[in-house]
Image (spheres, rainbow, N blue to C red):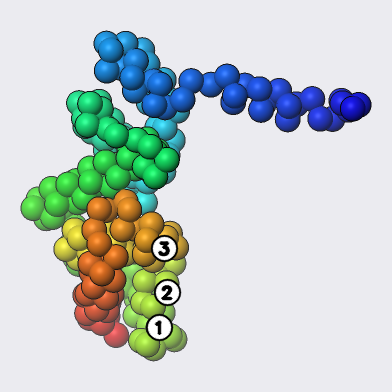
Amino acid sequence: MEIRAENCEPIAEILVKANEVSDEALIGQVCAGDEAAFERLFNRHKVRVSRLAYRFFARREQVEEVVQEAFTRAYFSLPEFRGGHEFSFAAWISRIAVRACYDELRRQRRRAESNLSDLSEDESAYLSRRLRDNPLGGSVEERIISRDLAGKLLARLAPEDRMVLTLLNLKDQSIAEVSALTGWSIGKVKMRALRARNSLRRVVGRYV
């Protein structure tokens, strides 16, 4: 069979991937005392964890703190990782990252860093105008197009409510995917999502 030049690059990429050390093999090396192997795991998955953290936090330093916390937890929990076809390291570290985000949301809540007074007059007027033009009845969170404004409104919710709305609604995750990320049952995700939407409506309703 003739191999054309335009096919060489994809074939090369396939060969590189075939020769890559698997996550499971790297985990085994880490557990055997090879810390350099964990650095390879970190470099392989840090973008995934960072993107997940950016769903919850706008400031870079917060995201970096969550990423560091997630991988620190993963490092000390590696002996508990079971892996297998149904639960990859990518899924495992994502779940740990979600938990780290949740814990940070709880810390923020206790410190009361955000409240309704954070909304400027322009933001309040914008929100009021949007709600007048689009009466309640649909999905409120889909009408909030400003990320900063959405963050300030979501900050008024309980950490569990904010987490489920951020994962489920704002990024179009399925209920099953949110269940896998949070460790909650599908029934709990549905219940919490309904409660969160109602809570968000009450917050937004103050500007109608």
Q: Is residue 56 above or below residue 155?
A: above
In the rendered structure, find residue 138 and report the number of the disc placed on it.
1
Is residue 63 among the parts visible in the rendering?
Answer: no
Q: Quadrant of the C terminus?
A: bottom left
Residues marked 3 and 2 touching at CB (< 8 Å):
no
Q: Position of residue 33 (x, y in %)?
A: 27, 11
The amino acid sitting under disc 1 is: Gly
Instruction: State the SS at label 2.
Output: helix
In the rendered structure, find residue 156 and report the number of the disc placed on it.
none
* Residue behind mark 2: 143
Residue at 23 percent across and 67 percent down: it is: 188
Q: Earlier in the sequence, mark 3 or mark 2?
A: 2
**Of marks 3 and 2, the one in the foreground:** 3
Judge by depth and name the residue closer to the eye, 132 or 200: 200
Residue at 40 percent across and 83 percent down: it is: 138
The amino acid sitting under disc 3 is: Ser
- How packed mark 1 is, by other alpha carbons closer than 10 Å (few <14, some 14-19, many 20 or more), is few
Q: Quadrant of the N terminus?
A: top right
**Of marks 3 and 1, the one in the foreground:** 3
Q: Position of residue 40 (x, y in %)?
A: 41, 20
Residues marked 2 and 1 touching at CB (< 8 Å):
yes
Q: Is residue 45 left or right of residue 96?
A: right
* Quarter location, residue 141: bottom left
* Residue behind mark 3: 174
Q: Position of residue 98 (x, y in %)?
A: 28, 47
Q: Position of residue 130 (x, y in %)?
A: 41, 79
- How packed mark 2 is, by other alpha carbons closer than 10 Å (few <14, some 14-19, many 20 or more), is some
What is the distance, in whole Å, between disc 3 and disc 2 at their CAs?
20 Å
Judge by depth and name the residue closer to the eye, 8 or 130: 8
What is the distance, in whole Å, between disc 3 and disc 1 at their CAs?
18 Å
